[in-house]
Image (cartoon, rainbow, N blue to C red):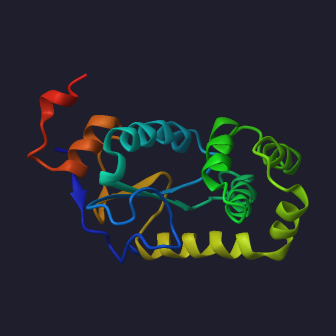
Amino acid sequence: MPKTDSPPHRLTPPATRDHCLGSPSATVSLVEYAEYESLPCAEANWVVKELVRELGDELCFVFRNFPVASAHPHAPAAAEAAEAADAQGKFWLMHDRLFEHRAELDPAHLTAYAREISLDIATFERDLRSGTPARRVAEDVESGRAAGVERTPTFFANGRLYSGPIEFLPLLKTLKGPDMDHDRFDR
């Protein structure tokens, strides 16, 4: 089974303010700190989609922003665009669009993606200017730092830092525990 460690600091547990796929009251949780411009984060997104599909409401998957501007200069603006889309109830649509186009995250493309997912563009742009999305991203970054996040993607499986491979089966086994029916998932 992949190695998990206690967080070096304090992981904020999933809360109603979080972006959650699955049931917020699920007994199994996976919290990810990631950024949209990172190739490893985009690859991890596909693994997460498989886990969400497999576990459904058994899992609460939480995505938290952790843009690293020094490595990915467009990541902060992309995170803010996702938060602005959330204000119109379309966080996950924007989230997926940003990962699909992680190499094109300049302001013109972000606005084009907002149009593609049918956001009200005037509201989207006003929300971005308001600073609310930037504050939300900063809160995620602060919670990540408090939990000891140093790079992306970083996962916490059931509240514990996950340091195994970012692959479907190892993550699934960590989430479900040693009593999981392994034959069902052998690929």
Q: Is residue 132 left or right of residue 157?
A: right
- Image height of 185 relative to 113, above or below: above
Q: Is residue 180 left or right of residue 5?
A: left
- Image height of 148 relative to 81, above or below: below
Q: Quadrant of the C terminus?
A: top left
Residue shown at 40%/72% (left/top)?
147
The one of 122 and 36 positioned closer to us in this rendering: 122
Could you tell me residue 4's position as x and y percent?
23, 56
Q: Residue furthest top?
A: 187
Could you tell me residue 58's position as x and y percent?
29, 52
Could you tell me residue 34's position as x and y percent?
53, 54
Could you tell me residue 102's position as x and y percent?
68, 40
Residue shown at 65%/46% (left/top)?
93
Residue shown at 83%/75% (left/top)?
130
State the count of labels: 0
Q: Quadrant of the N terminus?
A: top left
Residue shown at 25%/51% (left/top)?
175
